[in-house]
Image: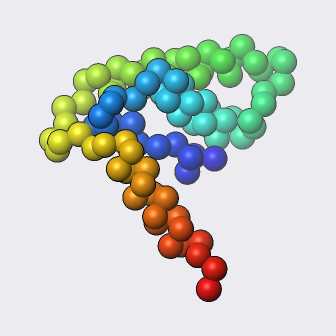
Amino acid sequence: MCRNIRPLNNFEPPATGSEVHDAALQYVRKIAGTSKPSKANQEAFDRAVHDIAHATEHLLADLVPTTPPKNREEEAAKARARSAKRFASA
C-alpha cells in the first residue's frame, strides 16, 4: 500500500490538501494493517489520518527546497514512460 504514496515536496503547483490527506490515509492503512477499520476503531483511525495529514502539511510548509520545483505533468509523463518500458510485452 505505501508504494502508492507519492513524494509531495518541491512540486509546482504545491501539494493539495487532498493529496496530503490521501498520503496520510495510505500510511494509516498500512500501519493499521487494514483498509477499512471496524466501527469500534473508526474514530481512532480517522483521528490518526487527520493528525498525520496536519503534521505533513506543517512539514511541507517548513521544508526549504535546494533544487528548483519539479513540474507535476513532466514527472507524471516520466513515470508513465518508465511504467510502459517496464511492463512492455516482450
In the drawing, does residue 82 fall left or right of residue 4?
left
The one nearer the camera, 59 or 87, is 87
Q: Residue 89 at what x, y percent from top left?
A: 63, 80
Dividing the picture into quarters, in which one does residue 41 lie? top right
As drawn, 56 above or below 50: below
- Give the residue displayed 55% in from the left and 51% down from the top: 3
Residue at the far bottom: name it. 90
In the drawing, does residue 5 fall left or right of residue 59?
right
Q: Residue 52 at what x, y percent from top left?
A: 50, 24
Looking at the rendered structure, the number of numbered marks drawn on it comes to: 0
Residue 51 can be seen in this image: yes
The one nearer the camera, 67 or 25, is 67
Dividing the picture into quarters, in which one does residue 26 lie? top right
In the drawing, does residue 25 fall left or right of residue 15?
right
**Quadrant occupied by the C terminus:** bottom right
The one nearer the camera, 77 or 54, is 77
- Give the residue displayed 49% in from the left and 29% down from the top: 19
Dividing the picture into quarters, in which one does residue 22 lie? top right
